[in-house]
Each structure stands twice: as structure tokens, then as C-alpha cells.
Image (cartoon, coloured by chain):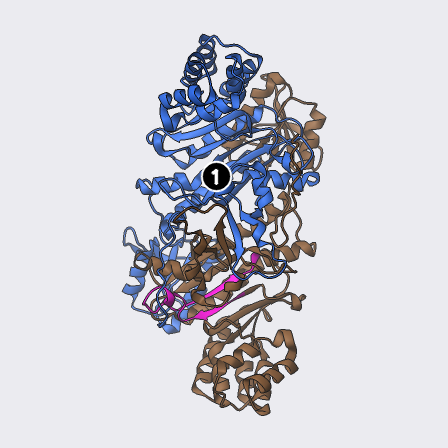
Chain colours: A blue, B brown
Amino acid sequence: MSDVPIVRPVPISGFPEWLPGVRAVEQNWLDRIRATFERYGFCSVETPSVESLDVLAAKGETSQEVYALRRLQAETGDDSGRLGLHFDLTVPFARYVAAHFNELAFPFRRYQIQRVWRGERPQEGRFREFTQCDIDVINVDQVPLYFDAELPRIVHEVLTDLGVPAWTLNVNNRKLLQGFYEGLGIDDPVAVIRVADKLDKIGADGVEKLLVGTVGLSATQARAVLDLAAVKADGSAGVIEAVGRLGVKSDLLSEGLDELSFVLDELADLPAGSVVADLSIARGLDYYTGTVYEAKFVDWPGFGSICSGGRYDDLAGSFIRRSLPGVGISIGLTRIFAKLVAEGLITPGPASPADVLVVIPSDERRRAAVATAARLRARGLKVETYHQADKLAKQIRYASRKGIGAVWFPPFEDGRDHEVKDMATGDQAPADPETWTP
Amino acid sequence: MSDVPIVRPVPISGFPEWLPGVRAVEQNWLDRIRATFERYGFCSVETPSVESLDVLAAKGETSQEVYALRRLQAETGDDSGRLGLHFDLTVPFARYVAAHFNELAFPFRRYQIQRVWRGERPQEGRFREFTQCDIDVINVDQVPLYFDAELPRIVHEVLTDLGVPAWTLNVNNRKLLQGFYEGLGIDDPVAVIRVADKLDKIGADGVEKLLVGTVGLSATQARAVLDLAAVKADGSAGVIEAVGRLGVKSDLLSEGLDELSFVLDELADLPAGSVVADLSIARGLDYYTGTVYEAKFVDWPGFGSICSGGRYDDLAGSFIRRSLPGVGISIGLTRIFAKLVAEGLITPGPASPADVLVVIPSDERRRAAVATAARLRARGLKVETYHQADKLAKQIRYASRKGIGAVWFPPFEDGRDHEVKDMATGDQAPADPETWTP
């Protein structure tokens, strides 16, 4: 053992890691998410974790959260000072599409499941390193509205398949908001959107005060803004009626309402409450231009959004002189998964993936045991071989501790039967390596 | 389109990214590697990409390659200054085992497939961000030699399964080297190992000069060191004979020779040339204490190692006052994969994972098309729906550009047949959404 001082081995706060049984569940989730994305024809893309700070700043908003790199001992010509870890997958994807524009077929639909980093103060649901699962569609010049409805359908399928507890995907449309504000005679609708986005945090009174005091709306305008934000409806008819009742009119409002209605109608077959129009959803980011999404747990409304996204017209425009609008949605995998772990809703899998443990009866029979394991593996089974001849009780106990469901006894002499012990029932019976199944 | 200046969207050198068809192959590789690891009962572990610099320095060698983090706008109490990206998966794994010691079952065998970062100058085969696929076994107090042989067997199975061009896994043993040097009467065998490790780079003459001039060996000793390094043999008999001929004796040498022979004997069933004793392999890192591995392409001997690893007695000792020896091996996935891409040996997969594209014959039939796609997906098929009603020729061309093998025509009126066009043959025929297979 070393004499050097002990470095405390705790993981750093905000950087989650899981024990093997929990990791097995996370891995299974990732596989299922990927499978659903691929069932909808999305291809896999990964981008480097590192981009130039210029690229990361192209969206112009989140630079204070960026982790920049530095070399401990930088050499001449070292460029690490202008590199940083990506904080989302949308900006790198826009950069990727611009970089490979001539080699991609459009509309380009990709999924991207990767870690991202944000230098935030850790708190419940906020991590500094976390995995996001994104799907986006980018096309040249225009993206059919069809995709604004297909993406929530895919997210619905993913969350349903994973058995995530009740959630609501709230949908809104930035044109609807902006058009409504314009119809109210407001000059700077974007400023209103930024304030209205704080409704969750500061409440209606707080928003009203800001709208009047800071943005300069009249009390009537501010009241109307809040009335619109209070509109929630399951289907398009309810939204159209509720917005109509507010008596505000503009072309942009009509366009936004049409788009939102299309999305809701298209998703009308999903279970009630899973996709809901919520006109308080604004998504503070400037680059959204149409549909916006934000999903929350029904039972933990204060927990923050577990999926978010929307339609953007010009993200790739920082990198290429082409019009490349897109629409995308991001599932906050780590946020969801860690919450369910914390709530005790994730049942850890076994600590070993093995279907069976092959014991080593004696040093003389070690090779026979290894050969038996090889035969089982050749059939695609997952097989751990115990590592040395040892008391059988000890080897069986090891299988039990690792959650391995069966223990295989190769014959103690050539020509005798193989036997398998079912760890759940304790039964032991002869078995054939060529036909046995777990 | 934006008026802001264009940021060049090129990926940064040393940070590889792939087009979708190539990424599909990489993803397939990753799945197969994982499957092989799990067939041998290794469980999945992931650790954060970020560790404290103290942890990263615990191995005490590679700090100049570490990318440390910095927040662009750090707040009071911010700890990013003492955080860095991991440069391998062995140190984080040792930290993980120490952190979760009481919750793990030993011997603990895990696989870990993650990106790592090194602030190196990019060159062929050297990346600044790359994926490694590691398997390690760590146990309390002692790790049976059995594992020293099992790990190369697994790597052999992985590389064979992937169809990687001819490679050799070279094996040596540090006890053998150290014992031999001690038998020669050399006082500082570790200094000799460090010099001998440079044989590849500076040649026999260069090593001899350093051994005599810097380490202070006699010419006879230096000659003997080089004679040992020249020993290569397929099996244990050849190694024992060749080392015996050199006439040097020590207990440690015998122990190392026994261990190496055990590993070679245990792997004697693998194809000739795939595992070879090469006594020039030293692995410069101080922490190896027994078996060492290093794999190279047969046809590109100058390319550098594509797998490496060995046995270490005390890596976790920096984090916990327990004896936790281990043995591990790491497959340099990105290095191998990028080389094969560069050599034109990777045939890209299709740009879309979809088995079939469902066309939208008209706006009126869009929902029928979407419903047909849903029926196919419910059967587990991968289905892309075209995004809008459009000329059929255009929709078919899109399938062709994306490499989708079949195009599905939902009926143009209810009650008519579905039809499917096979894109390879051009044949079009009626098909049933409940029974069709790609």
C-alpha cells in the first residue's frame, strides 16, 4: 500500500455517477431511447465535446456557464485557451450541419445522445455534467410544420416506453405570443416574452409589476398579457376559443394560432393531458421563432423542465450563408433519471450482466470450466467464469452477491453430466451446454 | 439569414467527427464491443468526464496533457480551477472503486467505454478527444493470474468480431524484466525499463548508448539488456528456452517467466501470431507490476499501439488504505477506427437507419400515411415518414439519397392495397403492413 497522502475519492458535486446496478438501468434506457429515435428514421450523430469558444458564443447567450479549457502546461501555439466544452447539443449540431452541408441529405434528421457541461451551481435537478437526448430536423429554406408535431409524438413514445411517471408536454407558439402582443399595440414584444417567461419564478403579480414598471406597458396591456398566459387547453378548439375571447387580433397571432392548432390536432390521438397548449410557455431563448415545447412532471411541478425545445429559423446562420431552419427537442435524461433514482423509483438491475456463472471445481478442471464457458458464449449467452478453484459454497455465494441467476457446474470428471443450479429456486439439475437457456 | 460575421464551422483538429454513414458503423462497433464485454460478465460503469486535479495527478505522470477547466466568468467559491478532464479511464476507475468500495462485489470486473481527452499536438493516430474501451478487474489483496489471460482473450474476440486487420498482441512481464536486470547486477532496474521502453523510437544503438552513458551500465550489461529485448516467441516453450540461453538467473526472473508462461499457455488455442511474447515491451508507466500488453497492427508497425494495459498492484492505493490490485486492458477505439476510415477500409452504412420510407401521396392521405408508419413501427420496424405531400419521384429520390431500402405507398384511397417498392431491384408489389419485412 502506498505511503502517499490519500486523495478523497468522492465524486465532485454536480457530476453524477452510478453503481453498476443503476448504471445497467441507465444503459437500458439509453438503448430504448435510441431504438425509438431510430424507429422514426433519425440517424445518429455525435460531435466533439469541445468546440471553439467562437462557435459556442454564436448563440450569444450562455457564455458564463461555459467551461473553457486550459492546458496545465501550455506550449507555444497551444490553442486550448480558445476551446470550451459544449453546453448543449443544438449549437454543435448547427455547426455540424454547416460544416458538412454538401454531404448531407435534407431534410436532415438526426438524434444525438451525449454529455453536456454547464458551470452552474449544483442543486436538485441541476448537474454540471449531464446527458441529453436530442432530436432535430434541419432543412434548407423551410421545415414543414409536420415535424413540429412528429417530435412531441416521438418524445411521448420515449417517455411512455421508459415508464417515466406522469408528465405533460406543454406547447406554445412564439408567433402567437408576439402577434398577440403586437395586437395589443406593444412595441417590443420580445421584451415582454422575456418577462412573461419568468411567470413560474416570480408569479403573476411579479410579472405584472415588471411589465408595467420596466417594459412600460399600460395596466390594461399587462393584464391582457397575463390573461393570455393563463390560457391552457387540451385541444385546438379550446385554445382558439380561449384566445378568441380575449378579443385581440393580428395576422401573426392568427398564423401562430393556426400552427399551434395544427400541432395539437395532429397529436389529438395521444392520451389526454400528455400534450397540452399552455400559453405561458415562452422559452426565454431568443432564437425560437415558432413552436416551443417544455415538459414537466405532473407530480413535481416545481422540479423544472424535463424536455424542451422548439423551432428556430436561423441557428446555422452563424456558420453558413444559407437559410437552414430547424425544429428540435431535447430530453433531459440525467435530470429525469437522477430524480427517479432519488425518489426510489428505479429498481437497480443485477450487478453483473451475466446469465450464468461457471464454477471452477478444481485446478485440474479449470480448463474444462473455461471451455464450457466458451461453448455457452458461442451461443450468445453472457457467462462469467469464476476466477479460481475454490470452495463451491464460496463460488455460489459470489454468484448470489452479483445477482447472477444461475450457476453452472462443469463435470468433475470427463464424461459426467454438466449441472446447473437455478439461484432463484435453488434447484440443481443436469444441463446441456448446447441447449440450456437462462 | 443572419448579418453577424460567419464563424468557420470546421471541427477542431484532433477532435474527430463522422458523417452519419460512418457514425452508423462506429455505433455498430460500440454495440458489438459492449456485447462481447458483457458475454464475459463485465458490467458497465461510467464515471464523470471531470475529476479533481488531485485525483488526476494521483498517478503522477501525465499532468502536462491534462485539460483543466476554467469558468469564463467564475463566481466566488467556484471550484472549476481545480477540475480537469480525465485522460484515461484507469485512474477514474480506481477512484470509483475506492469511492464505492463497500457497495461493490469483488473481484470487481467492469467495462467502461467513454471519451477521454489529452492536450497533445494532433498527429496521425493521436487525437485530443477519443473513445477508449476498457476492461479491468480489481480485487481485494490479490488478483488471480487467470485474469491476465482472460483479458487478452476478450480483446482477441473483440478485434476478430470487428474484422480489424491483422494485429499482434504483444505480452511481457515486468517481473521478468526487473528480475533479469537484477540478475545482471543492475542496481536501478526501473531506470533501465524506462530506457528500454524507447527501443521503438531510438533503436538498439540509441538504447545502448543511454544505458551505458546515462544509466551507467557496463557494455556487457547493456548488451544483455538488448539481447533480452530481442526475444520474441509464440509460445511459452520458446520464451523459456530463449531466456534460458541468456544465462541470467534470479528469483524474480523465474517468477515473471512463470507468469508469462501461464498467460501464453492459457492462450495457446488462439490463432498463431495473435498473442506473442515480446520482451521488448516495457510500458513506461511506473505503476505496472507484472503482465504488460501492447497491440499493434501487423501492416502498420509504426502506427503506435492500438491496445495496451497490464497489471498494477496499487492504483487505488492513492484513494483508499486497502490493497486493491488490478489488471486491465484498453482498446483504442478511435485510433483504430479513424485509421481504418483513413485507409478506406470502413464502408459507410446508409445515411438513415430506416428500413422503409412511407410516402405521402397527397395532403388528404397524409394521416393515412402517418397511421401506416405507426403500424409498421409497432412491429419494431424503423420507418421514416416523408414530411409532406410531394411528387412521388421526389419522395423516391429522397429514399435513394438516404440509402433507405424500400418505399411504402399507402393506398391512394381507402380500401385499396398498400404497395412497396424495393429500391435495390425497383420492383413494386402489394404488401401488408402487418406482415411485410424489409
User: Going by the image, does A378 lie left or right of A109?
Assistant: left
* Residue in the foreground of this view, choosing between A168 and A57: A57
Asked if residue A127 can be seen in this view, the reply is yes
Quarter of the image that includes the N terminus of chain A: bottom left
Q: Where is residue A320, by image quadrant?
A: top right
Q: Chain of mark 1?
A: A
Helix, strand or loop at disc 1?
A: helix
Q: How many marks?
A: 1
Q: Residue at x 40, y 18 (%)?
A: A230
Horizontal and vertical percent position of residue B148: 46, 69
Horizontal and vertical percent position of residue B208: 61, 84
Q: Where is residue B131, by image quadrant?
A: bottom right
Residue A285 vs B185, above or below: the answer is above
Horizontal and vertical percent position of residue A122: 38, 44
The segment highlighted magenta reads B308-333
Residue A162 vs B23, above or below: the answer is above
Residue B322 shown in magenta: yes
Residue A112 vs B322, above or below: the answer is above
The residue beneath circle 1 is: A33
Q: Residue at x 37, y 23 (%)?
A: A206
User: Going by the image, does B27 lie left or right of A238?
Assistant: right
Mark 1, residues whose alpha carbon is within 10 Å: few (<14), some, or many (≥20)?
many
Residue B22 shown in magenta: no
Residue type at mark 1: give it. Answer: Ile
User: Going by the image, does A313 lie left or right of A293?
Assistant: right
Residue B398 vs B297, above or below: the answer is above
Asked if residue B279 can be seen in this view, the reply is no
* Residue in the foreground of this view, choosing between B16 and B102: B16
